[in-house]
Image (spheres, helix red, strand yellow):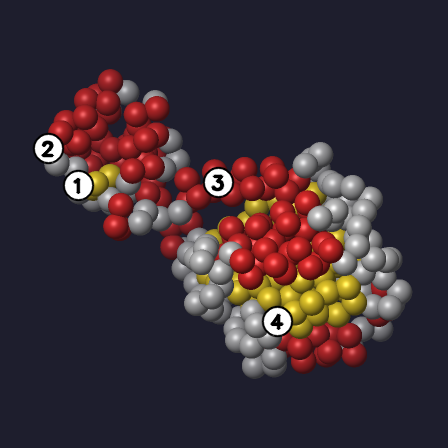
Amino acid sequence: MTFSIVARSADGAAHGVAVASKFLGAGAAVPAALATVGAVATQSYANLSYRPQALTLLETGVSAPLAVRALIAGDAGPVGQRQVGVVGAAGDGGTFTGEDCHPWAGGTAGDGYAIQGNMLAGPQVVDGMEVAWQASAAEPRLAYRLLAALRAGDLAGGDRRGRQSAAVLVVAKGMGYGGTSDVWVDLRVDDHPDPVAELLRLLEMHSLYFERPDPATLIPLTGAVAEEVRDRLKRAGHTTADLDAALADWAGIENLEERLVTGAIDPHVLAQLRAA
C-alpha cells in the first residue's frame, strides 16, 4: 500500500524518510527520525509503536538490521502483514517484508539506506528507487536525494492502486528553523492527484525560505549593489537608514529571515527583492 526510503546523508549528519502511498496522510503514520540516531518507516498495516521502539534501540547502539529483528520479534500482532525499514548512525539499513503483505511486496537495503514497498506495480519500483538513490550521491541535501528516489519509484509505477499522499522528514542537529530544532525538513502532501510532484514543489519552496545561505555566493552590501538594494527597499517602504536593518525588516515580512547575513546579501534574497 506504500513505498518508502529511509536513509542517512553521506556525511552521516542527517537522517530521513520519504514515503508515498494511495493512503490519506501517509506522512502522519509512516516516518519517524531522531537527529544523530536514525530513522524508521513503518507501513503495511503499520505498527506505529515501531517508531519509538526503533529509535530507542538505535540510540542504545543496536544496529539497524538487529533493530528490525527486535521489532518483529516483539510484535504480538499480524507480523506477516508488517513492513518496516530502519537506518542508524552507521552501517547498513535494515528492512523487513512480511510474507502476507499484498503483492508485489519487497525491499532492499545497503550502506545507509533501506527501501521497501507493498502493493506495488512490481519489483521495478524498488529497483528504480535504489538506482536513483545511488545515482544522487553527489547531492549533499538528504531531502533532495530522498525525493529523487521517491520520484523514481513513482515513475516506475509506485502503488498499483494509484496516488494520494507523500511526505518527507529529515532531521539533523540544529538544522531546524532558527537553529532551535533538529527538524530540518517536514513536508506532507496528504491528498493530491500527483503528491510526489507536489512534494517536490514544496521542497523547492522550503529551500528558498528555510535553507541558510551558501557563504561562497554571498554578495557584499557595498557599492552599486548596496545602492540598488537601498533604492528597492525605499520603494517598498523600508526607509531605515541602517541598510542591514532595512533589509531585515523587509526580509522578515517576506519570510526570508533565515537567509540574512550582516553586511552581505544572498543572491536568492536579491532575486526576490528584484521580483518584488
Q: Disc 4, disc 3: CB below 8 Å?
A: no
The residue that label 2 is drawn on is 223
Which of the two discs, 4 and 3, sits closer to the camera? 4
Tell me residue 268's x, y (percent): 33, 37
Number of labelled discs? 4
Secondary structure at badge 1 equals strand
Which label belongs to residue 220?
Answer: 1
**Which residue is nearer to you in this view: 110 or 66?**
110
Q: Residue at x 29, y 38 (%)?
A: 267
Q: Is residue 157 above or below residue 102?
A: above
Q: Is residue 255 visible?
A: yes
Q: Name the residue type under label 4.
A: Gly
- The image quadrant of residue 61 is bottom right
Residue type pointed to by label 3: Glu
Q: Residues within 10 Å of mark 3 (few under 14, many from 20)?
A: few
Q: CA distance from mark 3 to mark 1?
A: 25 Å
Residue drawn at the location 48% of the way across and 40% of the way down: 204
**Coordinates of residue 272 in the picture (x, y in percent):** 34, 30
Tag 3 residue: 204
Find numbered disc 4 in the image and state the secondary structure of the residue it sits on: strand
- In the rendered image, which residue does mark 4 sit on? 110
Marks 3 and 1, the one that precedes in the sequence: 3
- Tell whether label 1 touches label 3 (CB within 8 Å): no
Give the alpha-carbon distance from disc 3 to disc 2, as whole Å: 31 Å
Distance in Å between CA atoms under marks 1 and 2: 9 Å
Do we see residue 50 in this rendering?
no
Q: In this orientation, which residue lies closer to the viewer: 211 or 179?
A: 211
